[in-house]
Image: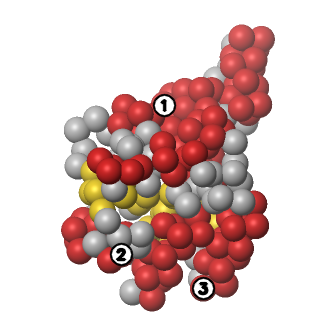
Amino acid sequence: MLLMIDHQPQMAFGTKSIDVATLRNNVAGLAEAAKTFKVPTVLTTVASKSFSGSIFPEIKKVFPDQKIYDRTSMNAWDDKNVVQAIKDTGKKKIVVAGLWTEVCVVMPVLEALNDGYEVYVVTDASGGVTDQAHNMAIERMVQAGATPITWMQYMLELQRDWANQATYDQVLSIAKEHGGAYGLGIQYAKEMFNTGEGK
């Protein structure tokens, strides 16, 4: 399952480890990949009405009718509704992305690991207030047993095989829109060689 934590304006304002435009692009790609593969997704915010603002519009566009769990605690694992929503998915693998890496990501990741979950952290759909803050948080989570991944890696691991036609077109569409040079290469190959092959 995918847990997206506190992708909100106020949190983005303080994020310095990744350019915010790149962050928003990566978050959109991650959300679209999860929806394409029907991955159970839990969305959380912190103090959305009083401080941090609404969830990124890119996420809201992908999950327009989904419940968003708004918290007061920095640690999503302290919120019983969030933890119950995660348990209700019945999954033991959690993919996590959020702001900030060194607070609202690291805390629930460590708790989830302690509770026996297999945890993956999407490093390029997360961000910290400095490079060092982000990097040290990733290092701490890895030392505790989490696995770092990127959003594109996540999507392509879900796809696994280009013969998987059920999601083929949508994966290429997401890659073209959010995949940078790779996406441009797909577009180029299609135009020049009339092929839709992903690699």
Locate residue 148, reporting x and y percent.
64, 66
Q: How is the image coloured?
A: secondary structure
Mark 1 surroundings within 10 Å by alpha-carbon count, few (fewer than 14), some (14 through 19), many (20 or more): some
Q: Is residue 195 left or right of residue 162?
A: right
- Of discs 2 and 1, which sits in the foreground? 2
Q: Is residue 156 visible?
A: no
N-terminal of the pair, mark 3 or mark 1, is 3
Q: Amino acid at mark 2?
A: Trp
Q: Which residue is mark 2?
A: 77
Locate residue 42, reporting x and y percent.
33, 57
The residue sitting at 32% across, 39% down in the picture is 63
Q: Which residue is mark 3?
A: 144
- Of discs 3 and 1, which sits in the foreground? 3
Q: Is residue 18 left or right of residue 11?
A: right
- Check the image and report above or below for 18 versus 196: below
Q: Quadrant of the C terminus?
A: top right
The residue sitting at 41% across, 49% down in the picture is 52
Could you say which quadrant of the image residue 177 lies in? Answer: top right
Q: Secondary structure at mark 1?
A: helix
- Give whichever of 51, 119 is nearer the camera: 51
- Give whichever of 140, 165 is nearer the camera: 140
Q: CA distance from mark 3 to mark 1?
A: 35 Å
Q: Amino acid at mark 1?
A: Gln
Q: Is residue 52 left or right of residue 127?
A: left
Q: Which residue is mark 1?
A: 170
